[in-house]
Amino acid sequence: MRTRLLVLSILLGAGLTMFACGGAKPPKEPLVTETVADAGPPEPPPEPPKPKSLYERLGEKEGITKVVDAFIKNAASNDVTKKRFAKLSKERVEKFRNNLIDQICKESGGDCEYTGKSMKDAHKGMKITEAEWNATVSALKAALDENSVGENEQNDLIAAIAPMKEDIVEVKPKAKK
């Protein structure tokens, strides 16, 4: 009887042990998806995009062409400059137009090639006055406004062409005594 009691207690102990564990799975360890020994320094953030060139901000060649067309219309109707335009043939006006488009394109950072004369050679002997220069700048400003060109772009374009004044204006105002 003792043997039976012993066998029964062993079986009962084993049964209770199995019941208590209930066939539970052993606990899982967290998954490691990647092990990096030495990642090095963090990657720098991407560089901000380059600012647009004046050429792009003017609307590229299409935008420049619209401004030049409006400029020629304005200059040809301006009381100070219209006499100069009235003397030009259609071919000369077209050549002037194309050269001006290419020149503004190049000066503003576009990939156009200006093949016209230097400003000094192109205007030599024309006796352009300070008043004509100012009227021309006003005609350009009006053309820029008509084409909704922003103030920053207008200032940048005028700053790009301002140095040409020395080569264009031949008749300086007389000094007052």
Image (spheres, helix red, strand yellow):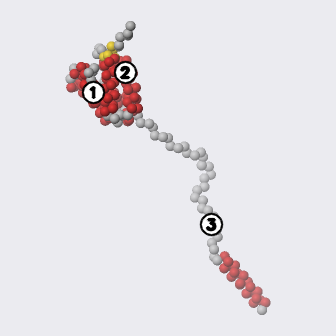
Q: Around disc 2, counting alpha carbons within 10 Å, would you say few (fewer than 14), some (14 to 19), or many (20 or more)?
A: few
Residue contact between numbered discs 3 and 1, judged by CB atoms under 8 Å: no
Can you give x and y, in whole percent of width and height, for residue 172 in the image? 35, 13
Label 1: element kind: helix
Q: Which residue is mark 2?
A: 164
Amino acid beneath label 3: Lys
In the orientation shown, which residue stands out farthest toward the front?
177
Q: Which residue is mark 3?
A: 28
Q: Residue at x 69, y 81 (%)?
A: 16
In terms of image quadrants, where is residue 66? Answer: top left
Mark 1: few/some/many CA within 10 Å (<14, 14-19, 20+): many
Instruction: Give the SS element for disc 2.
Output: helix
CA gap, disc 3 to disc 2?
79 Å
Quickly name the residue at label 1. Answer: 74
Examine the rendered structure and indicate whether residue 95 appears above or below residue 175. below
Q: CA distance from mark 3 to mark 1?
A: 82 Å
